[in-house]
Image (cartoon, helix red, strand yellow):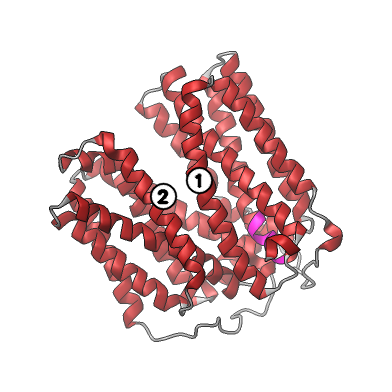
Amino acid sequence: MILAKNSNFRMLVFGRVLTNFGDSVYTITLMYIAVSIYELGVSSLALFGLVAFLPSLVSFLFGPFIDKFSNKKLLLIALEVLHFLTLIGVLVTVYYQLDYLFLLILHGIFSFANTLIYPTQSSFVPEILNNNKDEISKSVYIMNVTNNITNISSNFIASIILIYISVVGILAVDVFVFFLSILFFLKISNNRITMNNKKVEDTDFKSSIKYSFKYFWSQKEPSRIVVMEGILSGLTTMIMRIIGIYLVIINVGVEYLGVLLAFQRGAEMLGTLISAKINMAYKNFFMVDYLVSGISIIMIVYVENVVAKLILFSLTFLFIGMSGTVYGKMIYEYYEPQHLAKVSTVIYTISSVAIVACMVIPMVYKDIENLILITGIITVLFGLYLLLFEKTNVIAPERALSKNA
């Protein structure tokens, strides 16, 4: 197993797990701080959400810089130190009850570090695994499983400890978590990493940005799937933000939202575990995914039985869990290691634009059932699009661009 035989990858995964855990605890705690301590209104909370998304919207600007940065370990540690220092700033702001503007600025800095640290980790994986394609493919599964476990446990733990520990105490614990993640990243040995020997030409900033998009679109199959995934991610985020209202509409009660979210997380986790056994062409998998998920979402609206709705809901997120691993493998398969940060940041930008756009929809159109129905129809249409397209190879074709950025 990669975790057992590659100590560098093990340190990266442990550091990544702690980063995800700390990030989740921070997000939940910040929401509590904003509502319960600073008593912010809807507009101020929306501003906090916007600040968190802004770095993702422009993340493509930083992809070329990450790819050209030869010492990924140093960059990773620098971003984690930024997390660490920002969190200390949040702790001081809350402890001394400073103006919420400080909190907003610190949240922006934290979100900026978050936006860059995950593409940095993604581009670092091939170097750590010596560009071994088989191990890279396995690493996607390992990271998805650990991410899902971390997300489930951190949300649960953060919700529980908020009852028994002060906000300042939780922030202090979170500062320590990020400190530990820095220690794990420091343990990564540069001497045991085979650096990519393909030289990246030093181009000007504007040319690098243009090349990022050109290179991303050069692979037709994955780029189309990325756009579809981005749109569906935005629609799913929109639905999950208003799902509590739907529970009231079907006379279930918003108090069961926790149960619904537990089924969501459980289904995603099961899907991630199953994903290791999937051996299909990427296009074929996403075609089945979209058709089954889309029909399930449509049926949720028309089926009366609550248990049946829950089963259909869980089936949808089962496929979402499976798709995470397949999606990650597809990106590593089609795109060259020295351009992974460019690709990752372009993907983040596409997803973020879709999420922001979809979050605006309920503000102007408030029919919840129709929004769910439209989401299902769009998902099915994407599945039909892939079904009717010309078949492609399971293995990625030769790289469309031989020129390096």
Q: Amino acid at mark 1?
A: Asn
How crowded is the residue under tag 2: few (<14 C-alpha within 10 Å), some, or many (20+)?
some
- Extreme residue toward the top, this view: 96
Mark 2, residue position? 265
Q: Is residue 324 above or below residue 75?
A: below
Location of residue 20 in the rendering, given as x and y in whole percent from the top left corner: 58, 45
Q: Say which residue appears at 49% left-offset and 85% top-offset.
A: 393
Q: Say which residue appears at 80% left-offset and 63% top-offset.
A: 193
Q: Is residue 205 above or below residue 360?
A: below
170 on left or right of 163: right
265 on left or right of 66: left
Q: Quadrant of the C terminus?
A: bottom right
- Quarter holding residue 114: top right
Location of residue 168 in the rendering, given as x and y in whole percent from the top left corner: 58, 20
Location of residue 166 in the rendering, given as x and y in whole percent from the top left corner: 54, 19
**What span is in magenta?**
121-126
Per the image, label 2 sits on a secondary structure element best described as helix
| Residue 69 in view, yes or no | no
Given contact means CB atoms under 8 Å apart, are the residues at marks 1 and 2 in contact?
Answer: yes
Quick one: 202 or 124, which is closer to the camera? 124
Number of numbered discs visible in the structure rendering: 2
Per the image, label 1 sits on a secondary structure element best described as helix
Q: Is residue 390 above or below residue 53?
A: below
Principal secondary structure, stretch drawn in magenta: helix
Location of residue 277 in the rendering, given as x and y in whole percent from the top left corner: 49, 72
Q: Amino acid at mark 2?
A: Arg
How crowded is the residue under tag 1: few (<14 C-alpha within 10 Å), some, or many (20+)?
many
Lower sequence index among marks 1 and 2: 1
Residue 151's tag is 1
Residue 261's tag is none
Q: Say which residue appears at 23% left-offset and 58% top-offset.
A: 374
